[in-house]
Amino acid sequence: MKKFYIRTFGCQMNINDSQKMSGMLKTLGYEPTNNWEEADVILVNTCSVREKPDQKVLSALGEFKKVKNKNPDAIIGVCGCLAQRAGYEILQKAPYIDMVFGTTNIHHLPQLLEEAKQGNKAVEILEEIDENENQLDSYPTVRDNKYTAYVTVIRGCDKKCTYCIVPTTRGKERSRRIGEIIQEVQWLVEDGVKEIHLIGQNVTAYGKDLGDVKFYELLYAVANVDGVERIRFTTGHPRDLDINTIKAMADIPQVCEALHLPIQAGSDKILKAMDRGYTQKEYLEKIELLKKYIPDIALSTDIIVGFPGETYEDYLETVKVVKEVKYDQIFAFKYSPRPGTPAADLKMTEDPKTLSKWLTDLINIQKNIAFEKNLAYEGKKVEVLVEEEKDGKLVGRSRTNKLVYFEGKHNLLGKLVDVKITKANRFSLEGTINEKELQLI
Ligand code: SAH
Ligand code: SF4
Ligand code: F3S
């Protein structure tokens, strides 16, 4: 049997696209391998959100090129956001690539592969969105995790954050029809999935382009599917997170008490320059509402340090928000100019060394907050979806997205169990289950 290997960079959208491409390649008779050296098809699904991922792609390609020494017929393909943005450039830098395709024509992979197998360069990067792109959704996903699954509900982004390449690489917002989403959720549940993770660059904008449905209605519809035990969604935009969504999160038992709500910066001056569409006060008001309606909610965020024009005082506003909100997790990065974005030509205010220090300080502040939050779990009981067995222990996630380790039998995999937390670590929790309850399950 022919084998394929996919290396994925970037966000949840890319991960889900790779899972669908795996499903597609399996349908074509290929089997997955974890070793690229024995693959007949290698796909690199790229991200272009910062400069680092761009560089990582090129070095990965340099490595994968060696596959052709042993297997000259092996096919190397590049897809995803960097391919959409700069596919022809990559082809020039790495002429040994056989296949390049963008983000809206992934469903053409079978035809492109056929062309590449004939010895042609198979290149298809579309400027316009392919109207049949949703065909991709009809393929099964091949997932590492049996019990949780991503479901794409909206593609693209209509926001115009001045630093961001995503609107260029993913195009305008396109929501999937609710019926198609529910159908996919039903298939996943039949396949043993317990937790549905709705994804999009901006899920809270779901339905705007369709006109007749809102994100909170989608939440209710997914919750109504028999067998859906948990629901998560990523990423919500603070501007589109409305009271109806917050109330639905509180009302629907399956929606987990966790939300990723990117703030990007604390200073109003910088938020305006980024064109985020909210002030620090407005953001904090939404956080207050979330905490009011969902008292145990775990919050996470994205932060950019050193956007052009950011002074030390501006940066301190970000630090202030981080301390005040007490996030469970933050994803903080230094600003990275992206070609073609409105901010690309703006002058950086601080030198990279200073920005690295700001970033490290921020991450260290957050480390202590996260540990404190984990410590508060000691002695409490949490519901865990048991996902896998690792080093003789069972591992799963709490509703608040904490990794929980405990001892238990294999037959608990895929079940929801109550775990009493006995020890908090920096990045995980440890606990025990009640033997009596164990008998009942
Ligand atoms: N749609 C999501 C985020 C998508 S990109 C949102 O609006 O929140 C993921 C994260 O990458 C962003 O939240 C941002 O923090 C970061 N990012 C995007 N462009 C960046 C850039 N030019 N430099 C540094 N970080 C960036
Ligand atoms: Fe990028 Fe802003 Fe869209 Fe998020 S909302 S993907 S940061 S443009
Ligand atoms: Fe990267 Fe594209 Fe996602 S740029 S963050 S893979 S949408």
Image: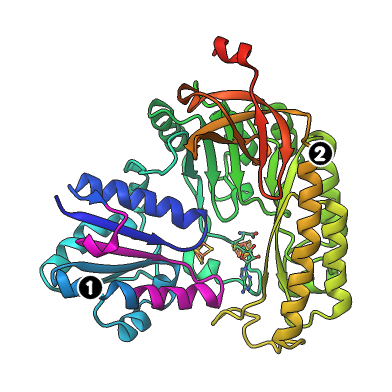
Quarter of the figure with the C terminus: top right
Taking 180 as reference, is 318 left or right?
right
Res 306 seen here:
no
Residue 30 x/y as whole percent: 20, 50
Q: Residue at x 45, y 31 (%)?
A: 193
Please, is residue 220 above or below residue 289 in the view? above
> Within the magenta stretch, is there residue 42?
yes
| Mark 1 lies on residue | 98
Taking 147 as reference, is 430 left or right?
right
- Give SS at disc 2: loop
Per the rendering, the mark at residue 285 is none
Magenta part of the chain:
33-61
Seen as rendered, the residue at the extreme left is 118
Residue 289 x/y as whole percent: 83, 42
| Mark 2 lies on residue | 376
- Give SS at disc 1: loop
Residue 242 x/y as whole percent: 74, 44
Please, is residue 192 above or below residue 352 in the view? above
Q: Residue at x 66, y 81 (%)?
A: 343
Please, is residue 46 above or below residue 437 in the view? below
The part of the image, by quadrant, that contains residue 373 is top right
> Within the magenta stretch, is there residue 313?
no
Please, is residue 393 above or below residue 373 in the view? above
Q: Nearer the viewer, residue 212 or 287?
A: 287
